[in-house]
Image (cartoon, rainbow, N blue to C red):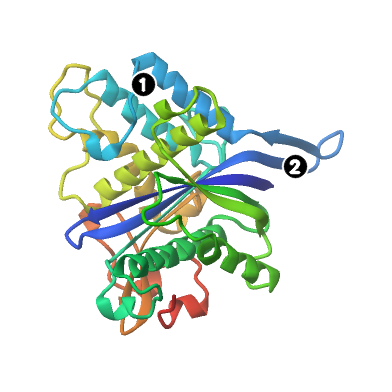
């Protein structure tokens, strides 16, 4: 199997008591090539356009609930459950289902779309760490620090979420919004990984095309022509936002996450808890221990925290709030970082 993917990137800040920053990468295949061996007439090969399938379902929900606003998790509020909130919950359920790698009961899509999700949370860099980064101005140093974390997430996610039986080819990264004082650096994020690929340091099942680019795009779909490529990208960026917001809420908020099914017009104590519940269900599958490997969501997502201690990168797996973040970073890292990334801090 091979997935040709477009990666959708978004950021967050101020998560939890530590006020963590975060990156999310949503891997959406535009083509999944599958070859099933055996059978009476030999191997059976076919393709799936996961992006089209996912986009079509999200648009159906928009139309069903007349929810043509920009979906943004942070802006969800109030206590009266509206048709827009129902649409937002349906979007999160669709996103979780799109991450499946296998069949299971009660699924939305007729077959797995093989989307993937990578999230990394990290502390704001101390001034001492920023001194390792060039650029002169503090805002440039901070941006280079963020780019380093993004590159680490990208590499760790593709190494963990894919394998020799499911190869990945990265076509493009689309990031939410206009650049700050400059665009994200393709050299710092992509070309360093391409150099590793050419030198054999990147896993053999990962390919980054030489013309892969990072595109900055406003995530408000209303700013783009309906049905255009940009409109589709904006929709996927909104989905990435909803999944990231849900992860952040169920992992860092001291609020009971609810599985209730409120009626439109009914009172809801915390809407975000209801909307984010499908993500909590997915993340909690990891509590099955070794049996998690039999889940349809096994190796379809990774949620980690990165931090600096004694000038070295440390990593922890982030789990849902009631059990906090596990304390022993050495045993819970889900991202397959190389030895140099685990070691001394570098730009």
Residue 26 in the image: above or below residue 189? above
| One can see residue 335 in this view | yes
Q: Quick one: label 2 or label 1, which is nearer the N terminus?
A: 2
- Residue of label 2: 35
Marker disc for residue 68: 1
| One can see residue 258 in this view | no
Element at badge 2?
strand
Q: Quadrant of residue 305?
A: bottom left
Question: Do the CB atoms of the residues marked 2 and 1 lie less than 8 Å apart?
Answer: no
Q: Quadrant of residue 202?
A: bottom right
In the drawing, does residue 280 fall left or right of residue 48? left
Give the x, y percent position of residue 142: 33, 67
Where does the C terminus fall, quadrant-wise?
Answer: bottom left
Give the x, y percent position of residue 122: 32, 64
Q: Nearer the viewer, residue 11 or 308?
A: 11
Dot 1 crowding, Cα within 10 Å, few <14, some 14–19, many 20+: some
């Amino acid at each position: 199997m091979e997935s040709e993917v477009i990666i959708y990137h978004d950021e967050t800040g101020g998560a939890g008591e530590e006020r963590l920053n975060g990156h999310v990468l949503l891997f959406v295949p535009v083509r999944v090539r599958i070859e099933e061996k055996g059978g009476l007439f030999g191997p059976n090969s076919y393709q799936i356009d996961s992006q089209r399938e996912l986009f079509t379902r999200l648009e159906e929900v928009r139309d069903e609930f007349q929810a043509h606003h920009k979906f943004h998790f942070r802006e969800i509020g109030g206590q009266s459950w509206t048709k827009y909130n129902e649409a937002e919950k349906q979007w999160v359920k669709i996103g979780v289902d799109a991450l499946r790698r296998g069949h299971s009961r009660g699924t939305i899509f007729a077959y797995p779309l093989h989307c993937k999700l990578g999230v990394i949370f990290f502390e704001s860099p101390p001034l001492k760490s920023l001194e390792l980064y060039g650029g002169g101005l503090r805002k440039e140093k901070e941006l280079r620090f963020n780019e380093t974390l993004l590159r680490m997430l990208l590499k760790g996610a593709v190494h963990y979420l894919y394998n020799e039986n499911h190869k990945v080819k990265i076509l493009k990264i689309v990031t939410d919004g206009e650049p700050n004082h400059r665009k994200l650096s393709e050299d710092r994020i992509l070309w360093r990984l391409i150099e590793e690929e050419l030198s054999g340091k990147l896993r053999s099942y990962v390919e980054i095309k030489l013309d892969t680019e990072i595109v900055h795009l406003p995530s408000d779909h209303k700013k783009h022509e309906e049905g255009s490529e940009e409109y589709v990208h904006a929709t996927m960026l909104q989905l990435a936002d909803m999944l990231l917001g849900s992860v952040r809420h169920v992992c860092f908020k001291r609020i009971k996450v609810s599985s209730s099914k409120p009626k439109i017009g009914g009172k809801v104590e915390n809407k975000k808890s209801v909307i984010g519940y499908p993500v909590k269900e997915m993340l909690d599958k990891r509590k099955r221990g070794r049996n998690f490997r039999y889940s349809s969501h096994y190796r379809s997502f990774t949620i980690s925290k990165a931090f600096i201690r004694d000038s070295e990168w440390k990593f922890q797996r982030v789990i849902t709030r009631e059990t906090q973040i596990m304390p022993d970073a050495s045993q819970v890292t889900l991202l397959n970082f190389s030895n140099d990334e685990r070691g001394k801090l570098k730009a």
